[in-house]
């Protein structure tokens, strides 16, 4: 294959690979990625990234090389049929076993934008880690990310079958994705806090220590007393090994045309860390957010950019993190220009993609 885009991942990690593959499908253009995860101590495809690449190949019946463990160069050609000048992807039912505690939710992240080119519903069941480091816990996806994106046309839901913690994984969840018309995103302003929902989970092996309750208590005591707790859910889950997670969903009044404001804050339990401290860590992140003015949390900041590329729009991010900068550079590399305007507060910035330059224009 002759790649349309030659990309260099030497200064990036797994998010670069996931988004690049998604963009290749959305543009229906072949890509070559060199120096895969080049700035990581163990570069190349690890199990989780390999699962993403293999899934993309299977969904598209794509031509690909370098899709193997440890590979530092990938070539990928989705070779989709087109209709009206736009690629069309068949849905169907698929199952993926990452084989480790690799992140289920990060694989979902790679697939979500494909809703824009789906012809029929897609059901993707993935086995791996549902609540593991360096990735959003499953409850963040279910209660923050998907509800936020549904306001802009994404038709998606996530169903949990079994929790999976590090190191054994073994969790399972299913992503239900339907053909979607993504609308321009406008997330620039934020009003007053309008409520809090709290989701605290413990493995059954930790139930005697009341870990889920103690995480929730730690978070609640650390947060502003003025926040109304609209839901408090403490769950004990069967799993292959001990583990715990907490997700806080902050709801707030949004600006005109911005829909319902949502932001999420998470923490995972670790051996030797008191459960109360885990809850406090999530609450500290929420308190930092409340002290600022951005309408999205720092993790959603870069995750919204691929949806900006689809339909255009504007998002105020809490800061220009490395992930935001890398995502912007990737969009530019595949001919989706972005702009970044720093706010007068010196911290937040508005990232924009003009609708005329968006992929679905």
Image (cartoon, grey):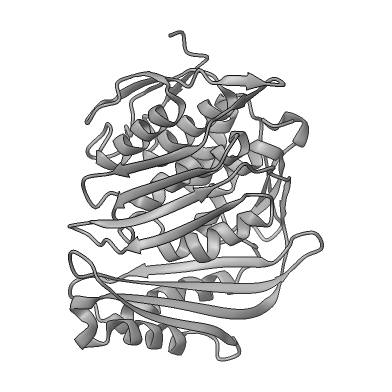
**Image vertical order of residue 288 relative to residue 93, above or below:** below
Residue visible at 52% across and 76% down in the picture: 287
Residue at screen point 56% across, 79% down: 196
Q: Residue furthest top?
A: 2
Q: Quadrant where the N terminus lies?
A: top left
Which residue is nearer to you in this view: 182 or 8?
182
Q: In which quarter of the image is residue 49?
A: top left
Residue 358, image x and y in percent? 70, 32
Q: Which image quarter holds the C terminus?
A: top right
User: Percent position (x, y) of residue 254?
Assistant: 73, 67
- Describe residue 117's horizontal placement relative to residue 58 as left or right: right
Residue located at (46% from left, 26% from top):
60
Q: Where is residue 205 in the image (x, y as percent from the top left)?
A: 18, 77
**Left or right, 18 with reference to 103:** right
**Please, is residue 342 above or below residue 171 in the view?**
above
Camera-side residue of 207 and 166: 207
* Occupied quadrant, residue 27: top right
């Amino acid at each position: 294959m002759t790649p349309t885009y030659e990309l260099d991942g030497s200064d990036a990690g797994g998010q670069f690979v996931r988004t690049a593959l998604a963009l290749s499908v959305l543009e229906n253009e072949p890509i070559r990625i060199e120096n895969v995860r080049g700035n990581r101590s163990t570069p190349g495809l690890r199990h989780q990234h390999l699962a993403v690449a293999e899934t993309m190949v299977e969904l598209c019946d794509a031509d690909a090389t370098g899709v193997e463990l440890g590979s530092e160069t990938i070539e990928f050609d989705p070779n989709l049929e087109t209709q009206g000048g736009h690629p069309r992807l068949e849905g169907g039912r698929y199952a993926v076993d990452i084989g480790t505690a690799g992140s289920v939710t990060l694989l979902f992240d790679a697939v979500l934008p494909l809703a824009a080119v789906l012809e029929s519903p897609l059901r993707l069941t993935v086995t791996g880690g549902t609540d593991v480091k360096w990735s959003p816990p499953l409850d963040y996806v279910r209660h923050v990310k998907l509800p936020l994106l549904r306001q802009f046309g994404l038709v998606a839901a996530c169903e949990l079958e079994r929790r999976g913690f590090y190191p054994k994984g073994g969790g399972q969840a299913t992503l239900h994705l339907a053909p979607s018309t993504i609308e321009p995103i406008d997330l620039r302003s934020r009003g007053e806090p309008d409520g809090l929902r709290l989701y605290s989970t413990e493995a059954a092996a930790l139930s005697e220590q009341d870990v889920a309750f103690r995480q929730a208590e730690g978070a609640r005591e650390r947060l502003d007393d003025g926040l109304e707790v609209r839901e408090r859910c403490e769950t004990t889950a069967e799993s292959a090994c001990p583990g715990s997670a907490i997700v806080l969903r902050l709801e707030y009044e949004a600006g005109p045309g911005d829909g319902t404001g949502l932001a999420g804050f998470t923490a995972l339990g670790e051996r030797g860390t008191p459960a109360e401290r885990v809850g406090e860590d999530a609450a500290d992140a929420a308190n930092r957010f409340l002290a600022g003015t951005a309408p999205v949390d720092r993790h959603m900041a870069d995750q919204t950019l691929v949806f900006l590329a689809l339909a255009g729009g504007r998002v105020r991010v809490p800061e220009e993190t490395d992930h935001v900068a890398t995502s912007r550079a990737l969009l530019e590399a595949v001919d989706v220009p972005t702009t970044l305007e720093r706010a007068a507060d010196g911290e937040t910035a508005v990232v924009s993609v003009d609708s005329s330059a968006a992929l679905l224009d």
